[in-house]
Image (spheres, helix red, strand yellow):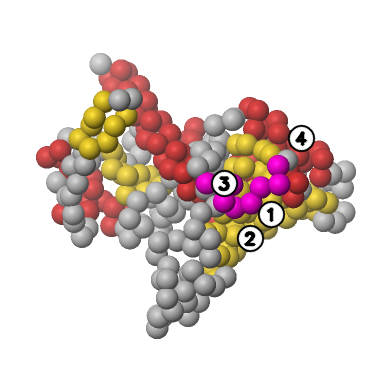
Amino acid sequence: LVSERGGAPRRARLMCADNPAEVPWDAFGVDVVIDATGRFRSAANLAPHLENGARRVILSTLPDGDVDRVVLYGVNQAEAVADDRIISAGSASTTAMALALKALAAAHAIEHATMTSVHAYTSDQSLQDYAGPDYRRSRSGAENIIPNDTPAPRWVERALPAVEGKVSGFALNVPVQAGSLLDMTVAFASLAVDAEGVNELFEAAAAAEPALIAATRDPIVSSDVKGRSESLLVDLQGTMKAGENLIKVLAWHESLGHARRILDLAALYGGLDAAQAGESS
């Protein structure tokens, strides 16, 4: 494979293997492996990357079970240490929800938050109905709205102690190819929180962290989110008072934003390694 960046051609080796144990990373001087297959999500299944010479492996999705660290970039990356070896970068919807709740919890006590993740269908969904063990997941992703469980609330709670025990949610996979939406309803301890005040919090968060968060009052739809590099794009037109202490929030995210956070995470650990090497020299 040949890619160009900044006008200079760069060669990359393309290999084919069925599992991590078959790839000799040490032979190619690979330091960090990003496992984006979605097939290997436990520490035991990811460990062969390390055994074959990689210093660190970053999982592109949420793990099955415990790993050294789950980092939702923009929320809990300060907890990362150089000794972490198997790291999960979370998921696009998990990071988006955590960033939204972080912005709100910094100003107001939250009693509960519930999320519906309206998600573009994914590569592990079939394009046609088939006879599978999970009846809903075995239906055509291109033709159906498919309800799904999601582990995102549990990982948001772990990353953001201010909302521990206060988050719930589920997912709907819908037949669009790109662009996903979070529909959140947040219950605040105070009755004084209003929609415009919440929008002001999101606009301030976007100004403080423009690489991670954006906010818009434009009447956008899912296809308008393609190519956005932020992890959270708050749809300010969708914010509304839904009860005495309830605020509904709409926010968009897209796969490219999550890919950028994975690169941010790799750079973060590279900096930690460099600092550790400097201390030991």
Horizontal and vertical percent for residue 39? 33, 60
Provide the residue designation for mark 1. 184
Q: Quadrant of residue 29?
A: top left
Name the foreground residue: 55 vs 218: 218
At label 4, the amino acid type is: Glu
Q: Residue furthest left?
A: 27
Tag 2: residue type? Answer: Thr
Label 1 to label 4, Cα distance in Å? 17 Å
- Give the numbered dot on residue 116: 2
Residue receiving disc 3? 225
Give the alpha-carbon distance from disc 1 to disc 3, as whole Å: 18 Å
Q: Nearer the viewer, mark 3 or mark 4?
A: 3
The 10 Å Cα crowd at callout 2, few under 14, some 14 to 19, many 20 or more, is: many
- Disc number for residue 67: none
Q: Which of pointers 2 and 1 lies earlier in the amino acid sequence?
A: 2
Of mark 2 and mark 4, the one earlier in the sequence is 2
Identify the amino acid type marked 1: Met
* Contact (Cβ within 8 Å) of mark 2 with mark 1: yes
Q: What is the span of residues highlighted in magenta in the rendered image?
A: 218-226
Q: Secondary structure at mark 3?
A: helix
Instruction: Tell which of 269 and 124 is nearer to you.
Output: 124
Residue 194 position, x and y percent, is 84, 44
Q: Disc 2 versus disc 3: distance between alpha carbons?
A: 18 Å
Choose between 218 and 60: the one closer to the eye: 218
Q: Quadrant of the N terminus?
A: top left
Q: Position of residue 75 (x, y in %)?
A: 55, 38
Question: Mark 4 falls on what kind of element?
Answer: helix
| Residue at figure coordinates x 38%, y 30% from the top left | 267
Question: What amino acid type should be assigned to the residue bearing mark 3?
Answer: Val
State which tag comes first along the sequence, 1 or 3.
1
Dot 3 or dot 4: first in sequence order is: 4
